[in-house]
Each structure stands twice: as structure tokens, then as C-alpha cells.
Image (cartoon, rainbow, N blue to C red):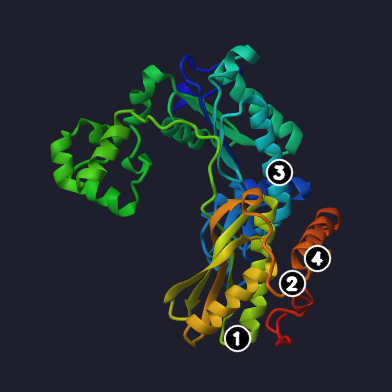
Amino acid sequence: MDRFKARDGQWPDDTGCPVLHVDMDAFFASVEIRERPELADKPVVVGGTGGRGVVSSANYLARTYGVRSAMPTAHARRLCPHAVFLPPTFALYTEASAGVMAIFREITPLVEPLSLDEAFLDVAGALRRLRMTPGEIGEQVRVRVAAEWGITCSVGVSSTKFVAKLASGLAKPDGMLVVPRTDILDFLHPLPVSALWGVGKKTAERLSAIGLNRVGDVAAMPLARLKRAIGVAAAEHLHTLSNGHDNRAVVPESVDKSVGAEETFEVDLTDREVLKQELLRLSERTAATLRRRDLRGRTVSIKVRFGDFTTITRSRTLPVATDVTQEIYRTACRLLDEQTPPGAIRLIGVRMEQLEEGAAGGQQLLLDAPERGWRDADQAADEARAKFGGAAIRPATLLTQRGEKPGPAR
């Protein structure tokens, strides 16, 4: 990969390579270290810190000990007991993400966020206006993100989304890879088949069983034979990618399909009042996210995972879309009471689906609410939290410690 790496302001020919993939490096951990510079030379792990927590992010020093995202926190502690373990600070991550995405949109309106910490950019229309090449824009992005937000990012530059995303991953940390459109096959074919989008562990094993270990092996196999080995749809998809073809455009407006939050408990819970307290906490988080994104949802869904890992979802569609905490919470409670069997519960979640933009849905009014009611309270709480922090105002029910038996949830 060395010949594709940007070094000292030099990189391969980027003509006809308008697609950039920008990915923040160890995003959550980097933001935490920015806030605590004394942690810069220590392994840092961000995620659930309890017995059933999961790693959300680990800096590169922690990764040298084998710590990875989605790993149980308990396992991460065994691998790196001297690491600094921190709970997530989502307000900081949201702020940094918004700022980084604003930088991207100053360069081009064609920005397709994939998550808080990564996005595709199509800079074809910006090249003449900025009088820069795609590689120069990629370098400018890296410099501005570091200067304005105190974190680093890696950039992949190529003619397709698939190759640009692979390139940014191989540029990590804090680097840039440029893959010329004429060299895409030279870049792709030495890579393991797991680099192909859609190839997980099982598919990789099936491909290996028929002698396909590299992307070039997949590209070289006759399509008819590949179809017989792994099925028509998978074969066509992988054969297309392995030969460097990807016609997907950068889509700037990606509509959220759902918004939600969930919680895994330290110990399994059976007390329905305690579970309803958690539903209120999760409904509040979900509703706040909806309001922040100017969205409302019509379908309230709860997810319940029991102690034996059996998982169910139950949902109810409202007559009018809403972003009101109490409406979401009351519906979630009814789903728990009426459609959830008894048993010890390990995880519970709340999700809103069938989303629409806030202005299109009109204001949701509860049947028993006064003219100025719960939605006004939600908006006032949003303003208070924006000014004084997330803990500035909370429902009284949530002032009890988790695990204590609260009074009736209101």
C-alpha cells in the first residue's frame, strides 16, 4: 500500500477521483483525550463500564493490547487492566460530529454521513471553485479537523465509494491514501476477500474453501462458477466489486429509518416499576434525539431481551407522529404491560419508527394535555440542557438511583 500513501504533500495521480471517504480516528476516545490531554500517552477505552458493558471506542495504544470496539468491557479489562476506562460523553461527540460535518459541507454540499464519525464527500463540483485537486482537498480536511476540533481523521480518495472507504481504513491512523482510477485493480486484488463489502466470516470461509483467498481470486473466477458456489446474488455483487465497479453515488440526504436507545442491566430485572423507570429514561433520550433532528415518529417499538437471551420486539403505531417524551413513554409502558410476557429481563430498548420531518407532521397534542403541555415542557428542558448540560433538568422519577424501587412512574 505504500505507493498509494500521501507523504510530504505528494500522492499518486488523483485525476478523476472525486470521491473522498473521511473517517475520524478512534473518535470517542480521541474526543475524551482532547478533553483530558494527560491521557494522551495512556491506553484509553470508552464504553459501558459495568459488568455487561461493551467497548464503544479504544485509542490505538489500547488496540495494541487487543482491545477492539464491540468487545465486552470485562474482556477488555483482562487484556489491558491498566487502561483508563471511561463512560461515553455523547454530548461531546455530537458537538464534534456536527462541527466536522460543517467543515465538509463548506467544501461541498454532497456529503453523505454514515455515522457520527465518517462520511463520503463528492468534490467533483468543488474542484474548479476551490482550484484544488481531490488530494489537496483531502489534506485540507485533515488539517482543518485537527486545528478546529483537536482530533485526527484518515482520508481515502478514489473514483468510487467502495475503494475510497477501503483506502481510508488502510490510511489509519491520521493518514491519506489516494487510489488512481487506473490503478484500482492493482490496489484491490492483493487484498484479502474479507475486504469486499458484504463478506463476513462465514462467506470468507466459503470462498476460502474453493480457493478464493484474495480479491483478485474472486475477480478471476468465471461468474457462472462463482454463482454455483455462493449463489447468484452474492456472486454478482462480489464479482462486480472485485473488478473495481461501483456505481453508487454520494447521496447527501439520507433519511433516518428509526431513532432509539437501549440499556443492558448489570443484573436481570423482574420489577416492572423499575423497568418502567428505565423506559422513561430511554423515552426521554429518544425524544430528545428526534427533536434535535427535527423528526417525529409514528411507531413506538420496545425491544426486550430476557435472561436466556431470547429477544422480542413489540410495537404500536400512533394516529399522529410525535416527538413528545410522555407520549412515547406511555405507549412503551402499555407495550410492556400488555404484550411482554413475565420473566427476568437483561436488556430493554425504546425505538421510534416511521419517521417524518417535524414540520410535515404538525404538532402532536395528547388527548388529556392542556394547550401548553408536555411538548412545551420538553422544549424548555432542551433549552436548559443546551445551556447548562445534560443533567440540568430531568423527570423527578429519574432522580432515584437505578435499582432503587421508585414510586409510580409519572
Q: Earlier in the sequence, mark 2 or mark 1?
A: 1
Given this view, does label 3 or label 4 mark the residue nearer the observer? Answer: 4
Is 64 or 283 nearer to us in this picture?
283
Residue at position x 73%, y 50% from top? 92
Residue 186 at least partly seen: yes
Q: Earlier in the sequence, mark 3 or mark 4?
A: 3
Q: Is residue 52 left or right of residue 200?
A: right
Q: CA distance from mark 2 to mark 1?
A: 26 Å
| Circles 1 and 3: CB atoms closer than 8 Å | no
Q: Residues within 10 Å of mark 1 (few under 14, many from 20)?
A: some
Q: Amino acid at mark 3?
A: Ala
Q: CA distance from mark 4 to mark 2?
A: 8 Å
Given this view, does label 1 or label 3 mark the residue nearer the observer? Answer: 1
Q: Amino acid at mark 1?
A: Arg
Q: Earlier in the sequence, mark 1 or mark 3?
A: 3
Give me the disc on residue 96.
3
Give me the disc on residue 372.
4
406 w.r.t. 221: above or below = below
* Label 2 element class: loop
Given this view, does label 2 or label 3 mark the residue nearer the observer? Answer: 2
Which residue bears the numbered disc 2? 369
Tell me residue 223's x, y (percent): 17, 35
> Would you identify the image quadrant in which residue 212 lies?
top left
Is 161 or 408 nearer to us in this picture?
408
Given this view, does label 4 or label 1 mark the residue nearer the observer? Answer: 4
